[in-house]
Image: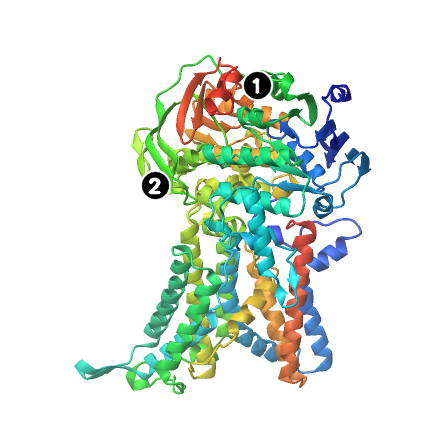
Amino acid sequence: MTQTSANRLTSPAAAVKGTTSLIKLLLKGRAFFALIAIIVVFSFLSPNYLTVSNLLIMSSHVAIYGILAIGMLVVILSGGIDLSVGSILALCGVVAGALMQGVELKPLGVILFPPVWAVVVLTCSLGAVLGALNGILIAWFRVPAFVTTLGVMYMARGVALLMTNGLTYNNLAGRPELGNTGFDWLGFNRLFGVPISVVVLAVLAVLTGLMLSRSSFGRWLYASGGNENAADLSGVPVKRVKITVYTLSGILSAIAGLVLSSQLTSAGPTAGTTYELTAIAAVVIGGAALTGGRGTVRGTMLGAFVIGFLSDGLVIIGVSSYWQTVFTGAVIVLAVLMNTIQYGARGVRQ
Amino acid sequence: MSDVATSRPAGEVVLAARNIAKSYNGVKALKGVNFDIHRGQVTTLFGENGAGKSTLMKILSGVVQPTAGEVILDGRPIVFSSSTDARSHGISIIHQELSLAPNLSVRDNIFMGREINGPTGVNYAEEERQVRELLAELEEDIDPLTPVEELRLGQQQIVEIARALSIDSRILIMDEPTSALSATEVEVLFKVIRDLTARGVSIVYISHHLEEALQITDHAVVLRDGNMTAYAPRADIDLEWIVRNMVGENYDLGNPPTGYDFGPVMLSVRNLTVPDPAGGGYNVVDRMSLDVRAGEIVCIYGLMGAGRTELLETVAGKLSATSGEIVLEGKEISHLAIGERIARGLALVPEDRQRYGLVQTMSVGQNLSLASIKEFTRGVFTSLKLERALIQKSIRNVTVKTEGPDVPIGSLSGGNQQKVVIGKMLATDPKVILLDEPSRGIDIGAKAEVFRILAAHAAAGQAVVYTTSEVNECLSIAHRIIIMRRGRISAEFTSDITKEKIMAASGEAVAA
């Protein structure tokens, strides 16, 4: 008897036999093989592609999409969609920027400069509140997820523009005499040579992976996304699951916002535009079903790296950014086509 | 069986079935059916669920093709390639679930897909004129421009009939046309049917309301387990004859477990009232009260729409009641969520296993353990070892035939899928288990096994409540049989009652 877990069920390592085994293996591990193919092809085209420093730089770019994609994955697993992540990222970045500039309390005549840890906590809380708003509208008021998150997407973007009047906060370094330095740590520091943003992504991915495969919440999530009615009648708190996933997605968007503004040392209201679509693409390329109930963190991470390494590779070999868009689109369509073949033809996961 | 078909009164045969057989993946749904449909007469198909009525209708209306045998139209063998093809030969079917677009008007529904086009697009005026003509013929005062969703169900049925007539249907197949109609609407429908037959239209009628069908029919065809058990004109038959041919010999689904005394009252429902969840404005469960004791098996029998499903769903926490109490082991539980009720020992096995029972994206094992996740969670993480043990125990308990717990749920047969849904709820170690039509869509062997499992659990002290629409299943393991009709208990019997009395109390038939 083999061991079972939600993770193992999508494992490409599952035993395959017969003449079709190679095709099955290629189909199952498609995101992985696509990533290998991208690395190999670009290594031939550019000598600078396959170097440790370049891989780390590209990974730090992937970190932003990757963090958003983890949040998108849990939402998609529940059978929903979150279009607001890019805007929440921008709003949280702008709020962090504003907090770093100091909060003026007019009646008291003082300007507060919160320390960086407080900025991080406040920003993540904002992300959580916006995500929970999505979740409550969807779970309790039964507003379709697409519409709810579309609305929040516009509202968050609008508030970010209002707050800054369309301008960008440029000085996020803080001042030593005010004790609020260190915001650039997220974007620029390294831990054993690895950018902090990549470390953050790895930690979040591992935690989410454990949550999905080993916690009861993970099981609730897969069940709610697979068949909400059956999960409900089996005692799964479906509404709580929904609110939780959107809240998680909001928090992860806030973290991505912090990382991005730290990397750029600036916080602008137009940051993260269309990032929600990149995150969805990463989840889909990673083999998750948009109908819910199927998908893994590992797949989503591979999807994020496929998109990131592909577009950075195209930049490195000097292909126009217009072509990058075309390529990315083609990869997404191909990925969905493969999903259809995998789930549709056999109708089963293993 | 074809010999019965010869003793017929004279009358032009428009459509005939000759040795029609149909298999789905090796399962025989129909095993050689012979009968004639006469011009301007009503032929009724009788039979329990799963007897093959719907398969036969689908063959006559061209939706599926028979694996053997012939359909003969006007004396010549014919093969319908599709329902559209059958329609073009004048055969229309009116399904139980109406196939109207509720947002469109009566006129647009009647001409859906075959709009009359003029030089400036659709000729609405001409369409409207024809619809008015049709509705006048049917003596139904409906404005052609009313959206269908604003009509009563009976009127919607008339619209369906009008649509069938508008394409010159000579043969009209009606599947349970009265199941959602009020008594007066049934009268209107029967009048329409008599008018239609007078005009030479032939009707194939399917109904569970035997009494009602006998009022209107000219010939009766009785099916049981895919066999045609009888075929006779109205003059030769009565209700008792139909029931005898429908139900047949009793197959053994077990007996009520004996040799122990019932324990205390486990579940007590008091004056429960539940409004129609579809917003129909009436109560689907109407001040109903019921006590179930430990070790007791209660069967709830009733027709479609009697309120059985809603009663169980309300007790389980899916629907909410407007008044009344639900008491589990002496404690009121109406305010609890489904999960909390399961934790207290109340489990529901829903009627539709695909929609409400199974998570299709999960494995057999994960489905079995879904309602008991807390049992194998230690701290933050689930324990694979404990889960594995729980799954193995469930597979043994409900005897699921599977290659292993990791195969997809979709790879199991219907009967085994049903056992997984039952096993999932039994794994929560319930004190009261409610099962809504547990035998639906599973073969006779699996049925017997499901009832054996339930009987064993009752003997072990659990209270069991199940619903069914098949009389045979009432007379199997149940200690007590409750008949529901229009949201209330219309009768209560012990296990020594006859089928005829059960059917009479449900409103299906008057006792012979």
Q: What amino acid is found at the position of numbered circle 2 in the picture? A: Leu
Q: Work out whether disc 1 and disc 2 sit on a shared chain.
A: yes
Residue B299 appears at what percent x and percent y? Answer: 47, 24
Residue B10 appears at what percent x and percent y? Answer: 73, 24
* The label number, if any, that marks residue B336 in the structure image: 2
Residue B221 appears at what percent x and percent y? Answer: 66, 25
Q: Up-down: is A218 above or below A57?
A: above
Residue A165 appears at what percent x and percent y? Answer: 37, 85
Q: How many marks?
A: 2
User: Tag 2's secondary structure?
Assistant: loop
In the rendered image, is residue B171 in sight?
A: yes
Task: Give me the chain letter of mark 2.
Answer: B
What residue sits 41% from the left and 57% below the top?
Answer: A243
**To which quarter of the image does residue B279 belong?**
top left
Foreground residue among B428 and B256: B256
Q: Up-down: is B212 above or below B250?
A: below
Measured in 3D between alpha carbons, the distance from the residue under mark 1 to the one under mark 2, in whole angstroms, is: 46 Å
User: Mark 1 or 2, which is nearer the eye?
Assistant: 1
What residue sits 68% from the left and 21% below the top?
Answer: B232
The reply to whether callout 1 and callout 2 are in contact (CB within 8 Å) is no
Q: Which residue is mark 1?
A: B239
Q: Which residue is situated farthest in the right direction here?
A: B76
What residue sits 64% from the left and 79% below the top?
Answer: A324
In the rendered image, is residue B159 in sight?
A: no
Task: Give me the chain letter of mark 1.
Answer: B
In this rendering, position of residue A219 left or right of residue B248: left
